[in-house]
Amino acid sequence: MSHRGAYVSGDRAAGGALDLMLLRTFLAVYRAGSFTAAAALLGLSQPTVTSQVRTLEEQLDRQLFERLPRGVAATSVADELAAQVAGPLDELAVVAGRGRQGEESSEPVHLGGPAEMLSVRVLPALAPLVEQGLRLRVTAGLADDLLEGLRAGRFDLVFSAIRPRGRTVLATPLMDEEFVLVAAPAWADRIGPVACDDPSALHGVLHGVLHDAPLVAYAEDVPILRRYWRHVFHTRLTRSPAVTVPDLRGVMAAVVAGAGVTVLPRYLCAGELDSGKLVMLLDPDDPPINTGFLVQRAGAPVRRQVTLVRDRLLQEARHW
């Protein structure tokens, strides 16, 4: 018998079978990454979940989780046990509950991601599936908050601009965002040509009209603009923004109207660049690039609708 198989069907067989409720609770903790999140998923109290996991550890005579200040970390024993029981428990859930064949299609797929990406890329790509009966529930937010919700089971899929860490989630690269420095034509004329390969000319631009142009940003600490200045101009951006809008579509609208200068993902402003409403101030050989990831929980129950959404987005992303 393999070492993995011994956890449930070997050593415990002589002393009695393991309780399915304990295994179900263990799997919820393993997938959620914390007792609190698992309790919310199971509809139990956090002390009950903690007690059930402790009981299972005593029955197995193995430590399943390392307790951390925030959440838990699975041990190698937990990895092996999860690999053994996840499939059978998920199949039982399909038979016993909401995942029963014929009912799954009525359960929405829960998506999370940046508002701009969801609006411009994701929802248009999924429209054909909605016409075929897919139900969606979409939540916009910041990556850290959405990833926490994914681990807690509130989302099926999350689009993240940062690569998540840990074994509880699986991240697939979806698309690369190229960032561009843009302004309305009037500001572009005032600023003039911007070059990053001529130090003297660059110094004049950075301390001339571009320095005086109002900055329009996503947040007060201008993260996208700061990264562009550091990557392209090799200097720190220390100025405060004239306008902040917590939605890049709002940032773009303000800049199109002449509010100043900003940095945007190219995909978001491609139409405005083509129409001349915006002008790219600089076309560097090595522009800042950010990779977006499609993230789901490791070992989450397989749902046909979630798989359809994931496959559709991976297919569409090849053309983005």
Image (cartoon, grey):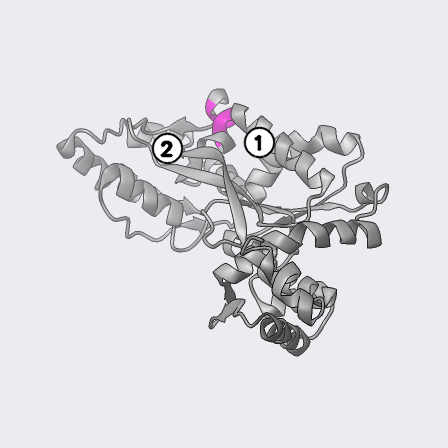
Quadrant assignment, res 187:
top left
- For mark 2, give the secondary structure: helix
Magenta residues (range): 269-273
**Which residue was labeled with disc 1?**
314
Foreground residue among 23 and 150: 23
The reply to whether residue 214 is visible in this rendering is no
The x, y position of residue 164, in whole percent, is 47, 50
The x, y position of residue 17, in whole percent, is 71, 66
Quadrant assignment, res 197:
top left
Q: Who comes first in sequence, dot 1 or dot 2?
A: 2
Number of numbered discs overlaid on the protein picture: 2
Left or right: 240, with 130 as reference point: left
In percent of the image, x 28 and y 48: which residue is there? Answer: 237
**Amino acid type assigned to the residue bearing label 1 in the image:** Leu
In reply to whether residue 32 is colored magenta, the answer given is no
Residues packed near mark 2 inside 10 Å, few (<14), some (14 to 19) or many (20 plus): many
- For mark 1, give the secondary structure: helix
Query: Residue 187, which numbered label?
Result: 2
Quadrant assignment, res 109:
top right
